[in-house]
Image: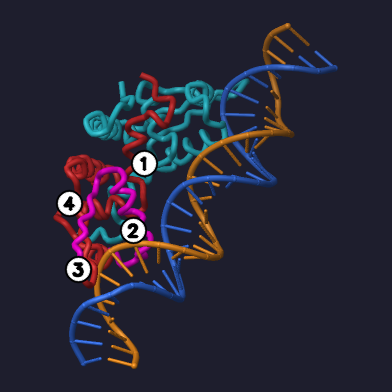
Chain colours: A cyan, B red, C blue, D orange
Amino acid sequence: MTYNDFENCAVNITIGMLAGKWKPVILQHLAAGELRFIQLWRLLPRVSKKVLLEQLRQLENDGLVQRHEHIKFPPEVGYALTVKGESLIPVLRQIDQWARVNLGDVKVMP
Amino acid sequence: MTYNDFENCAVNITIGMLAGKWKPVILQHLAAGELRFIQLWRLLPRVSKKVLLEQLRQLENDGLVQRHEHIKFPPEVGYALTVKGESLIPVLRQIDQWARVNLGDVKVMP
DNA sequence: TAACCAGGATACGTTCTGGTAACCGGATGA
DNA sequence: TCATCCGGTTACCAGAACGTATCCTGGTTA
């Protein structure tokens, strides 16, 4: 087992999938169920549409989130966790538990 | 519970502590015991001293790693996990487990 | 007619991250 | 005398990440 290569380090790859500034927050919101783009955007008032979109696209490319486009007007697009994305939630929850114990006064998962 | 703020999201903070390109690899190596700087550097042949040092300093600032300086010549400095750092290893291991199941053909923790 | 809606695209600028290369101190061995 | 050792610093640079502002579509509403 050599993980002297960061590219082949499974932990590194996974962390990389979560390392976007808003990704953990997005995943935790979607854990409660599908949300439309505009809903997510309103929940995260300090992120621009462009950045939110970038984060969602990356999560989509990594197979954690899926996009549902409903042909309507005005447009309506839902984002939801994939099975893979849902399987990551317990991991996030463990990270949250760790933080609860080891970090100071920080807000945590519900 | 509002984690609409990425700064207050425990998961985000923790991911941020792990998000350096070489940090998971470093932590996993140190999980086996203290290593001297040069040993670590030789294990990670593709990283420069400068970058390795940056990663170690950040891990140190986050309280995951501690530096032991032995006054000698040539210099001798050891890096080891702190208690907090060790407590993170099971979390990394769970991330690794997740990756083993959900990612393709990727090298994993020992 | 004009403003507005949701979801996005685009241009542009700044900051952060990682990378290279050269250098240092001062004991030791050839 | 000179290179070598280890841990570290410095200057400099490229690219990624993140941010702001503006624009678009094409139905609906005022």
Quarter of the view holding residue D27: top right
Residue designated by label 4: B31
Mark 4 or 3, nearer chain start: 4
Q: Tell me the element at label 2.
A: helix
Q: Comparing marks 1 and 3, which lies closer to the viewer? A: 3
| Labels 4 & 3 near each other (Cβ < 8 A) | no
Indicate the amino acid at tag 3.
Lys
Residue designated by label 1: B16
- Separation of residues labelled 4 and 1 (CA atoms): 19 Å
Whether discs 4 and 3 lie on one chain: the answer is: yes
Q: Residues within 10 Å of mark 3 (few under 14, many from 20)?
A: few
Q: In the image, A49: left or right of B3?
A: right
Q: In the image, A49: left or right of A16?
A: right
Indicate the amino acid at tag 2.
Leu
Depth check: give the residue in front, C26 or C20.
C26
Whether discs 4 and 1 lie on one chain: the answer is: yes
Q: Position of residue A95 (x, y in %)?
A: 26, 34
Mark 1 or 3, nearer chain start: 1
Q: Position of residue B102 (x, y in %)?
A: 28, 43
- The disc numbered 3 marks a residue on which chain? B
- The disc numbered 2 marks a residue on which chain? B
Q: Residues within 10 Å of mark 4 (few under 14, many from 20)?
A: some
Residue designated by label 2: B53
Mark 2 or 3, nearer chain start: 2
- Separation of residues labelled 2 and 3 (CA atoms): 19 Å
Residue designated by label 3: B72
